[in-house]
Amino acid sequence: MLFEFGAHSALLLPFVVPGLALAGHLLIKAVRFGALPDVLLSLLLLLNVLPVAQWMLGFAGWYDSHDGHSTAMFYVPWQPWLAWGPAFYLYFRSLTNQEFSLRRHWLHLLPGLIFAGLYAAAALYDLVWLRALHGRALPFHFGTKGEAAHWLDVLGAPAGWLGYALMLGYGLATLRLFRRYRRYLDDNFSDTERLRFRGLRDLLVAALLGLVLWLSFEVVNRAFGPLGYGGYWYAYFANGALIYYLSIVGLQANFAAVTPLRFQPEAAEAVPPRPPASEVATKDVLLEAVPTSGSSPAMAAAPLPVEAPVAGAPADALAPELQPWREKLLALMANDQPWLEPELTLAELAHRLRTNTSLLSHVINTGCGQNFNDFVNTYRVAEAERKLQDPRLAHYSLVGIALESGFNSKSTFNRVFKKLTGRTPGEVARPKS
């Protein structure tokens, strides 16, 4: 029988089939459009599906069939832990830098490639060289397993522990990259919510917790006796849940990654530290009154002056030769109000000022004492505060105020407003009469 349905095999089947289907779909899509994140997400899905598939097929009777199904079980690298950590690291790099290429980084996958290559070599030696060409019977497991596959079992335990170490090492390295990436976003984008990839970060934390679960099973197995296939089944079931988790957050991340991103960790390390947000006062330095040509009819009819704050370092903290750039920047923000554009980026602002992003970033960080994200959002929050206290706009909802102030969503508006003012928009809003 090809597949024996039972409680253990049937409960793992819904993880394996959708995981394989999505991995295949992503691979076909990657071939058509050349998207590296799709390739690496497909690989990650396959790496998660393989161990679950082994236990599923084992409980479906493949090891006990003593035929070709049993032979197939011994020549597949079902436990690809050597590749999981490097693959996730490379996947994150590919999402956050559209110029990222495997040509310079493929060596990260070398341990996993060697592991898979050993299984391919074992299959060639046992099944092709010895059995097919020389007619020798396979000596192990009722004639379904060859000598090379037998030796691979000996390497299984050391390879597994090395894989766990790589998962831990690459996982922690990727979490550090997440922190640097968040700083990169704040320095280059005014709307960072969908680009933060929080789901992937949470998935990585879940995977590292899953690693702790695996190690716990190993410790219990060695300290208190064999757990048996049934005991380990629960760990594989938990691993199956990660397939759905990875599918959901991975597809969301791949969709968000269409935004041009150029995150380079090496460059991020070289950036000097900025003053903490707690030291940045919201209204230390005031700009001239900003024209308020908002999109609402009420605003156009009777504009009110707005003091748009530029927080942080005093102007003389900037080198004298860069002072004109600071003045040009502040004049552009006051006159053109680019902060009303929800997806304004550092590159777009630099283009309008006819300069480069490095110089503009330095002017904002040093001359204004803020990162780009806080700098732009300070204007938006000041505009929102004025609108919230304007009695003629009392009929506006908080979402309407947020959108007309340059924010892209209510959640971002609430978070940024609380961060920069210490209050919620509801606490600032003028009570409705």
Image (cartoon, rainbow, N blue to C red):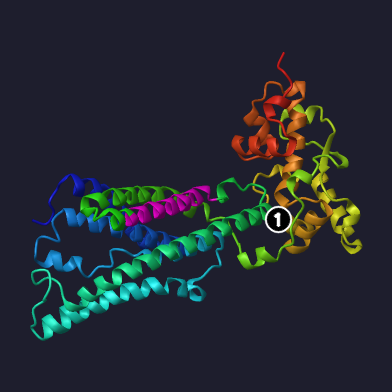
Q: Is residue 183 left or right of residue 34?
A: right
Q: What x and y, as percent, mark residue 60?
A: 15, 53
Q: What x and y, as percent, mark residue 222?
A: 30, 58
Magenta stretch encompasses residue 226: no
Q: Is residue 37 left or right of residue 224?
A: right
Name the residue: 9% across, 72% down: 143
Badge 1: how crowded within 10 Å, few (<14), some, or many (20+)? many
In the image, residue 159 sits, relative to residue 428, either above or below, namely below
Magenta stretch encompasses residue 209: yes
- Residue 34 visible in rendering: no
Dominant secondary structure of the residues highlighted in magenta in the image: helix
Magenta span of residues: 197-219
* Quadrant in the picture for residue 76: bottom left
In the image, residue 86 sits, relative to residue 346, either above or below, namely below
Secondary structure of residue under mark 1: helix
In the image, residue 132 sits, relative to residue 269, either above or below, namely below
The residue type indicated by label 1 comes to Leu
In the image, residue 146 sits, relative to residue 401, either above or below, namely below
**Which residue is identified by label 1?**
346
Q: What x and y, as percent, mark residue 81?
A: 37, 64
Q: What x and y, as percent, mark residue 103?
A: 49, 75
